[in-house]
Image (spheres, helix red, strand yellow):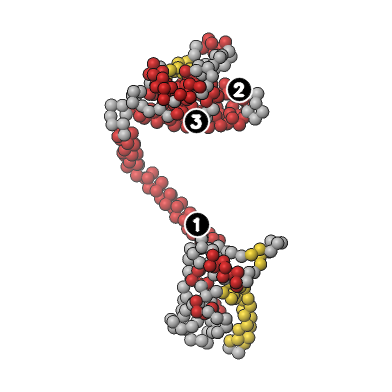
Amino acid sequence: MRPATAALSYTGLFVLQALWRGYRFGFDIMEVTGLASGTVYPALRRLEALGFVRSDWESDDRAREQARPRRRYYELTAAGRRKLTEADARYRALGKLFPGRTTT
Amino acid sequence: MIALSLRAALALLSAAARFVPAAVRSQWQEEWSAELQHAAAQFASRRFGAIPLFWMTLGVVRDALVVRGLALVRASDGCSPRRRPVQGVAQDFRYALRGLAASPGFVLGVVGSLSIGMAGTGAAFSLIDAAFFRSYPTVSDQSSLVRVGAQQTDGGRASITYDDYLVVRDNFTSLSGVSAAYAAQFAVSANGDAFSLPGSLVSGNYFEVLGVKPQAGRLFRPDDEASAWTHPAVVIGYSVWRAACRVIPRPSAGSSP
C-alpha cells in the first residue's frame, strides 16, 4: 500500500481532518464526525496501513491519573498531512467541517 | 442499565476478538475495551444511553473483520496481491483433505449421518409441503394463484356480477389470466337415482387458468360460454364418475366428458 497512489474516500478525509483538528481517539472522532463506529475504526486501520496515520498508546501514568483504561491515540504522519493539504485544495469546505478540539 | 450494556458489549468484544490475528489481538481488544468504557461513561448521562452504546458495539465485528483482512493483505506483500490469499485458501483445502483421508471412518460416519439427516429432512418437507402447502395437487404454479373478490362491509365474502368479472378479466393486466367460479348445488340423475352434488359454475377459461389437464375427454372451451345455456357442458371428477356414472363407458379423448 503506497500512500502516494492510494485514493482516499470521503470517510478517510473526514477522519484525517478530525485528527488534524485534535480529535485523537476513536470515540472522539465518532462524536465530531457523526460517523458510526463500524466506519471510523476500520478507517483508522486503513489509514494507518496506508501510512497516513500512526498510533501510540498513552502512558499508564496519565490513564491512571484519570482513573480509566489507557487509550490508543492516533496522529497524522507527514504523508497524511500532505494528503490532507491536497484534499483541502480540492474540497474547499473540508477545513470547515469541524471546530478544533479545545480540551484533551 | 448502562453497566449491563457495557458488560454485554465487552462480552461481544471477547467473541469478536477471535477473528483478529493473534499478533495484534490483545492490543486491539485493549483499545476497544477502553473506547467502550469511555463511551459508556459518556452515554450514562443520556436518557437512553444503552442504545448508542449498542450501536457502537456493532462496529466491533466489522472492525475485527477489517483488521483480519488487512493482515491478510500485509501477508501477501512481495507476491501478487490477489494470488497470495487464494493460495492460502487452496493450502487450507489441501490440509483439510489430508486430514480427512487420514481418518476414513470419521469421514464415513459424518457423511453417512449428514446424508441420513438431509434425506429425512427432505422427505419430511415433501410430506408437509404436499399435505399443507399444496392443497390442489393438479394445479400448476400454485404459488402464483390468487383469489380476487369483493368484500362486504362486515368482512364477509361477496359475489360479483358477471359484468364485473369481465371488467376485472379485461383490465387486470398484472395477472396472466382471470377466471370466474360460482359455487352451486347440482341435481344429478344417474342409475335411476336423483341426488344433489356440490360444484361450481365456471367461466370457459377456468381450467386453462388453473393449468389442469383432463384425465379423459376435454375441458371447457371458450365457445362453451359464447352464449348462455346453448349447450351446457360439465366437467366431473373421477370419484363422481365412478360413483354416479360408472355405467357410462370411459370417454375417449376428444369427446365431451
Of all residues shown, which one is farthest toward the right?
Answer: B154
Q: Residue B42 carries which label?
A: 2
Using the rendered image, report if marks 2 and 1 lie on a common chain: yes
Q: Which residue is drawn at 46% across and 51% down?
A: B117
Circle 3: residue type: Gly
Q: Residue at x 47, y 58 (%)?
A: B123
3 and 2 marks in contact (CB < 8 Å):
no
Left/right of residue A8 with respect to residue A59 in the rendered view: left
Comparing B37 with A5, the one in front is A5
Q: Residue beneath label 1, please? A: B125
Q: Residue beneath label 3, please? A: A38
Q: Which chain carries label 1?
A: B
Q: Is residue B186 above or below residue B121?
A: below
Circle 2: residue type: Gln
Comparing B106 with B226, the one in front is B226
Q: Which quadrant holds the N terminus of chain B?
A: top right
Comparing B180 with B254, the one in front is B180
